[in-house]
């Protein structure tokens, strides 16, 4: 099943568009090889095949909208992670609704108008929203002037980078949060950083052993090839695994209903 329609607000040179992601396959999961912007772009490129959108031209806020949709497709809307208390070392759970965070970020949206990847303020200021290519260039080692190019692409001189960053945070927000967490064991209050992009990619990397186990089980049970299993949509693969492992038996066929 594809994801629900996801609006993209900052496509360079284009009006806002609504797209959906193809359902993740094992091949897509296997191809994830990192947690950075480059890895996120590579994954989204595999899932945006039914749209004319080039993943490398996506702004960070649009990528997060797609990664949020992907999280819902794979695991639902609730983000759950375990934190280790800095004071007593006890692990405790931190969870929240992804959609609630997204609504909060949007409701904080400001006076900047967005069109074609350009933000325009009523006072006449404007800036270009950096896309993935800009971001990757800005952190690539040995690329001269990359940071300056990113600043320039955001329409800012070096001294105005902070202003541009604030405008981007308001008008093209990303799910990159500093959360307040309180340890239930010792009551210690502490901050916890949450970044959706690395969280989703890390979660897929963490499932690699489960994916190998799925492949082994299905190959053994049905005799399917590696390519056939990795081409299965994720939910179908998981359902076959449940049936083959006996945790979710196939429903009995209602023979009476089939009789003419
Ligand atoms: Zn504690």
Image (cartoon, rainbow, N blue to C red):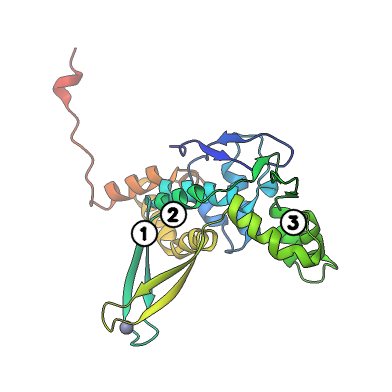
* Circle 3 residue: 134
Residue at 43% from the left image edge and 37% from the top image edge: 1
Instruction: Rate crowding at label 2 as few (under 14), some (14 to 19) or many (20 or more) other CA atoms within 10 Å.
Output: few
Q: Distance between the Cα atoms at labels 2 and 3? A: 26 Å
**Picture coordinates of residue 195 (x, y %)?**
52, 63
In the image, which disc is placed on residue 54? none
* Of callouts 3 and 1, the N-terminal one: 1
Nearest the eye: 201 or 17: 17
- Residue 247, percent across and down? 23, 52
User: Contact, CB < 8 Å: mark 2 with mark 1?
Assistant: yes
Q: Earlier in the sequence, mark 2 or mark 1?
A: 1
User: Is residue 70 visible from the viewing direction of this image?
Assistant: no
Dot 3 lies on which element? helix
Q: Which of the two discs, 2 and 3, sits closer to the camera?
A: 2
Q: Residue at x 61, y 63 (%)?
A: 36
- The residue under label 2 is 101
Residue ID at (34%, 82%): 188
Residue at image point 20% right, 19% down: 258
The answer to which image quadrant residue 159 occupies is: bottom right
Q: Is residue 90 visible?
A: yes
Between the C-alphas of marks 3 and 1, the distance is: 31 Å
As drawn, 83 above or below 55 = below
Residue at numbered disc 1: 96
Between marks 2 and 1, how big is the CA–CA gap? 8 Å
Name of the residue lying farthest toward the bottom: 88
């Amino acid at each position: 099943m594809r994801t629900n329609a996801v609006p993209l607000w900052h496509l360079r040179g284009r009006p806002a568009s609504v797209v959906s992601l193809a359902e993740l396959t094992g091949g897509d999961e296997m191809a994830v090889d990192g947690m950075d912007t480059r890895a996120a772009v590579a994954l989204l490129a595999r899932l945006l095949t039914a749209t004319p959108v080039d993943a490398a031209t996506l702004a960070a806020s649009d990528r997060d909208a797609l990664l949020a949709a992907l999280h819902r497709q794979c695991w639902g809307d609730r983000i759950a992670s375990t934190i280790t208390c800095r004071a007593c070392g006890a692990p405790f759970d931190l969870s929240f609704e992804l959609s609630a965070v997204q609504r909060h970020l949007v409701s904080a949206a400001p006076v900047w108008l967005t069109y074609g990847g350009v933000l325009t303020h009523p006072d006449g200021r404007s800036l270009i929203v950096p896309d993935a290519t800009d971001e990757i260039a800005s952190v690539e080692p040995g690329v001269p002037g990359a940071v300056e190019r990113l600043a320039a692409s955001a329409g800012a001189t070096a001294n105005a980078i902070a202003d541009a960053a604030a405008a981007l945070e308001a008008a093209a927000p990303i799910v990159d949060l500093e959360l307040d967490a309180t340890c239930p064991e010792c009551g210690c209050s502490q901050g916890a950083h949450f970044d959706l992009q690395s969280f989703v990619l890390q979660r897929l990397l963490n499932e690699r052993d489960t994916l190998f186990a799925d492949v082994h089980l299905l190959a053994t049970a049905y005799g399917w090839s590696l390519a056939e299993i990795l081409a299965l949509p994720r939910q179908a693969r998981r359902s076959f695994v449940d049936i083959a492992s006996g945790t979710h038996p196939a429903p009995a066929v209602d023979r009476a209903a089939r009789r003419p």
